Amino acid sequence: MITCLIIILFLVLILPFTKLVERNLEVFLFIMGIASIIVSQVFNMELLKEALTHPINITIAVLVAGLLFRWFQNPIEETVLTVSKAMPFRLFIALFVIILGLISSVITAIIAAIILVSVVSVLKMERKAEIRLVVIACFSIGMGAALTPIGEPLSTIVTGNLN
């Protein structure tokens, strides 16, 4: 059993870098999860119930946020451009990264990533600067999102165990 689980872990760590798995990452991870459940022989009705009910909150939050961003795309873009022109650009970027990290604990990492994409797509930046901004903002989102009970797996496990 341990050998099979180590093989599954190795596959999960290596195969996402291949083109086929990269394009179908969700399906691949789902299959690997099922394989690890089968190998570990831990399948029961409680696990099935948790797997079916746990993702509901984050799914609803992402659906609502996605719809809001679609409906209010033009005002959001205009606001971002207006604010970025009203202050020094470096200050705007710094405040954006800091605020995005702080609010990601309230709005979840996925919604913060949607905000990041919408803001970066509006700003006209050089490719290298854009990549730096996205990487720094992702770190900020990750640190802030660890505080939310519905978006990040580790914080969900902790808050679930603490009731």
Image: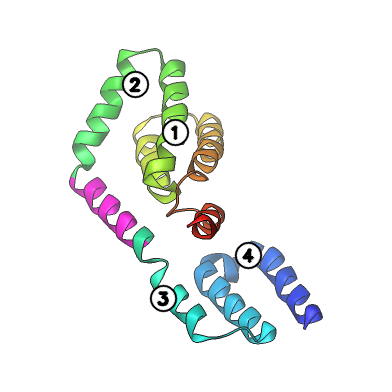
Mark closer to the observer (1, 2):
1
Calculate the distance from the C-alpha at mark 3 to the C-alpha at mark 4.
Answer: 24 Å
Calculate the distance from the C-alpha at mark 1 to the C-alpha at mark 2.
Answer: 19 Å
**Figure coloring:** rainbow
Checking the image for residue 84, the label placed there is 2
Q: What is the quadrant of residue 33 in the picture?
A: bottom right
The boundaries of the magenta stretch are 59-71
Checking the image for residue 52, the label placed there is 3
At x 56% / y 32%, what residue is drawn? 132
Mark closer to the observer (4, 1):
1
**Which residue is the site of mark 1?**
102
**Which residue is the site of mark 4?**
16
- The earlier-in-sequence mark between 1 and 3 is 3
Q: Are marks 4 and 1 in contact (CB under 8 Å)?
A: no
Residue 109 colored in magenta in the image: no
At x 51% / y 32%, what residue is drawn? 133
| Residue nearest the observer in this picture, 104 or 154 | 154
Residue 135: x and y in percent read 56, 38
